[in-house]
Image (tube, helix red, strand yellow):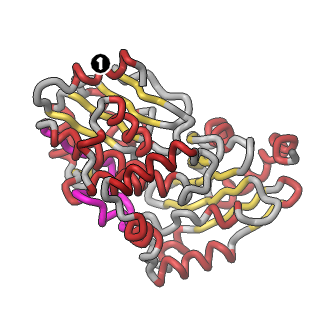
C-alpha cells in the first residue's frame, strides 16, 4: 500500500463508525476468511462492524470463528439493506466490480458511504475511494495481513483472526501449490501459525469433511470427464439432474475442475455446472503456465479472475454451451500448443 493510501485509511477509521464488509456472491474461503478477520479487527477498534454476504456459502466454512454473525442478504434482505444504507464506510473484499455481488449490487450503488477495496483480481473498477489492488498476491487474506502490517496493527491478530486468514490463503493457493504462492506467502503463514492458527485442524475442517453424496458426485464428474488432446484441454459436465440425484450442497463441486487439469499433458480445464434456477451454466476455468483463462472468461463467458483461475457463465443450455466451448478452442490453438 502507498503512504497516501495508508494515511487515507487511518483518516477513514478515525472515530467510531458504522462499517459494513462485503464479500462476493457465492463466497469462498478467501472471501469469508478475509471479511471475518477484518471485521474482528475493526470491532477491536470500537467500530460497529458487520459482514453482509450476498448469499449462502459452503458448509465446510461454517466452522470459521464468528461466521454465525454474518448477515446473508438472500435470507435477511431488510436487515442487510438497512446496514448498507446506514453505513459510514464500506469495505469490499475479494472482488473488484460491484456486479460480483449479484442482487446486492443495486443497494451498494445507492450507498452513501465511501468504499475501500482490497482485492487481488485483474482489472479493478474505480468505485472505491481507496483501492488496495495487487494481482501478484496469493489471496485477499494475504492482503488483509499486509493491510494490518501497513497500519502497524498485526498485534491485533487473535488466534481466531489467524485461523480465518490462514483458511483463505490455504484455499486460494490450492494448499500452497499454485504459482502465486511466494516466499512472502509462507512468511505470512508462519506468522499466522505463531499467532495461533492451527494448520492441521484447519486443513481437516476444509478438506476432510466430505459427505458420502459428495464423493458419489465426484464419481459422476470423473465419469463425465472428456479430453480434447489436440488442444491439451479437458472438461467436465454436471447437469442439474446429476446434482439433485446426489443431494448437491453449495461447495460440493469445489476443486472438481482440478482433476481435469491434473491429467498428463493437459494445460486447460473447465467444469460446466447446470443451474436451472438461474437458467445458466456456471463455469470454472483453470490452466497451467501462461495460458490466461481470465482472458477466455472475459471474452466469452461474462466472467474473469486470474491468469490460471477464472469463472464465468453461459446462458445457453449444456449441450449448446459445450459445443460453443469446443468451437472457440481453435482461436487459442497456438497458445495451447506451446
Q: Residue at x 52, y 66 (%)?
A: 253
Examine the image and state in which quarter residue 67 appears: bottom left
Q: Residue at x 47, y 69 (%)?
A: 252
Q: Position of residue 25 (x, y in %)?
A: 40, 48
Q: Position of residue 19 (x, y in %)?
A: 19, 35
User: Which quadrant, please, contains the C terminus?
Assistant: top right
Task: Look at mark 1 in the image and give the residue it sits on.
Answer: 8
Q: Position of residue 322 (x, y in %)?
A: 70, 57
Residue 236 is left or right of residue 15, and the answer is right
Q: Work out whether 200 lies above or below 322.
A: below
Residue 296 is left or right of residue 200, and the answer is right
Residue furthest toward the top?
4
Secondary structure at badge 1 equals helix
Crowding at mark 1 (Cα within 10 Å: few <14, some 14-19, many 20+): few
Q: Residue at x 40, y 54 (%)?
A: 166
User: Which quadrant, please, contains the N terminus?
Assistant: top left
Residue 257 lies within the magenta run: no
Residue furthest toward the front?
194
The residues colored magenta run: 47-67
Q: Work out whether 168 lies above or below 50.
A: below
Judge whether residue 123 can be spotted in this image.
yes
Amino acid at each position: 500500500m502507498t503512504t497516501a493510501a495508508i494515511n487515507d485509511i487511518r483518516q477513514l477509521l478515525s472515530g467510531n463508525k458504522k462499517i459494513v464488509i462485503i464479500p462476493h456472491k457465492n463466497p469462498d474461503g478467501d472471501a469469508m476468511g478475509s471479511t471475518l478477520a477484518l471485521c474482528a479487527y475493526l470491532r477491536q477498534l470500537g467500530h460497529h462492524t458487520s459482514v453482509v454476504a450476498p448469499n449462502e456459502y459452503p458448509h465446510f466454512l461454517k466452522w470459521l470463528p464468528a461466521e454465525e454473525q454474518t448477515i446473508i442478504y438472500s435470507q435477511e434482505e431488510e436487515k442487510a439493506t438497512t446496514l448498507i444504507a446506514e453505513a459510514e464506510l464500506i469495505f469490499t473484499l475479494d472482488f473488484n466490480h460491484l456486479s460480483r455481488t449479484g442482487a446486492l449490487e443495486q443497494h451498494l450503488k445507492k450507498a452513501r458511504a465511501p468504499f475501500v477495496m482490497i482485492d487481488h483480481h485483474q482489472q479493478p473498477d474505480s468505485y472505491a475511494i481507496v483501492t488496495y489492488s495487487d494481482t501478484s498476491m496469493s489471496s485477499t487474506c494475504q492482503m488483509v495481513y499486509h493491510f494490518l502490517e501497513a497500519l502497524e496493527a498485526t498485534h491485533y491478530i487473535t488466534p481466531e483472526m489467524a485461523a480465518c486468514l490462514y483458511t483463505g490463503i490455504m484455499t486460494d493457493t490450492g494448499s500452497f501449490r499454485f504459482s502465486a504462492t511466494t516466499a512472502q506467502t509462507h512468511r505470512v503463514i508462519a506468522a499466522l501459525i505463531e499467532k495461533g492458527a492451527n494448520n492441521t485442524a484447519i486443513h481437516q475442517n476444509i478438506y476432510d469433511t466430505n459427505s458420502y453424496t459428495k464423493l458419489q458426485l465426484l464419481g459422476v464428474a470423473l465419469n463425465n470427464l472428456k479430453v480434447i488432446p489436440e488442444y491439451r484441454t479437458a472438461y467436465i459436465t454436471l447437469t442439474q439432474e446429476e446434482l439433485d440425484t446426489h443431494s448437491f450442497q453449495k461447495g460440493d463441486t469445489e476443486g472438481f475442475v482440478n482433476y481435469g487439469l491434473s491429467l498428463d499433458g493437459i494445460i486447460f480445464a473447465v467444469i460446466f455446472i447446470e443451474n436451472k434456477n438461474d437458467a445458466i451454466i456456471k463455469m470454472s476455468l483453470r490452466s497451467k503456465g501462461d495460458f490466461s483463462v481470465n482472458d477466455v472468461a472475459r471474452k466469452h463467458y461474462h466472467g474473469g479472475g486470474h491468469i490460471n483461475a477464472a469463472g464465468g457463465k453461459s446462458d445457453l443450455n449444456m449441450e449448446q454451451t459445450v459445443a460453443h466451448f469446443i468451437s472457440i478452442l481453435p482461436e487459442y490453438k497456438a497458445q495451447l500448443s506451446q
